[in-house]
Image: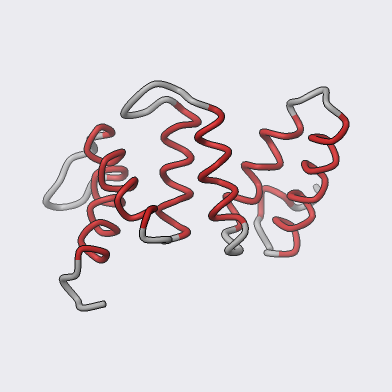
Amino acid sequence: MGIDSDYTVAVENCYAYRYGDKLRKINFTQAFDWCHRAAQWGDANSQTLLGELYYLGLGGEQDMRHAEVWFEKAARQGQPHAQYMLYRIHAASNDLARQERADYWLKQARQSGYKLAQPR
């Protein structure tokens, strides 16, 4: 991938519109669009940000199913925040199978060293 490839432009704009930078103000609608593009390229951090946008309903409707799909893609690539968010999503369920998945993802996030997942 070149320095100005579609991939790098999408990743840069995903972050820039999500958090703002010197050139761009925070714009969740733009962030959603750019993060979706970057996530489709397989970028784990962009997949995590897209999952957050769905989870929080920023830039569009809140959609927990889509949030879970994108967190799962990123988590399987070892992205610790996505692993932790999957833990939170599954832990909120009363379903035993989802509770077991919550335990699995919490363990993965802890092994990744994610601070929020560590015991206090």
Q: Relative to 39, is 116 on the left or the right?
A: right
Q: Residue at x 61, y 63 (%)?
A: 78
Q: Quadrant of residue 75?
A: bottom right
Tell me, what colour scheme is on the image? Answer: secondary structure
Up-down relation of residue 9 to residue 25 (above or below): below
Q: Position of residue 102 (x, y in %)?
A: 77, 41
Q: Relative to 39, is 107 on the left or the right?
A: right
Q: Position of residue 7 (x, y in %)?
A: 26, 64
Q: Position of residue 21 (x, y in %)?
A: 21, 51
Q: Position of residue 39 (x, y in %)?
A: 39, 53
How many numbered marks, from 0 up? 0
Q: Relative to 63, is 112 on the left or the right?
A: right
Up-down relation of residue 5 to residue 49 (above or below): below
Q: Residue at x 82, y 45 (%)?
A: 103
| Quadrant holding the N terminus | bottom left
Q: Residue furthest bottom?
A: 2
In terms of depth relative to the viewer, which is nearer, 63 or 26?
A: 63
Q: Residue at x 20, y 61 (%)?
A: 9
Q: Residue furthest right?
A: 96
Q: Residue at x 34, y 45 (%)?
A: 36
Q: Relative to 62, is 12 on the left or the right?
A: left
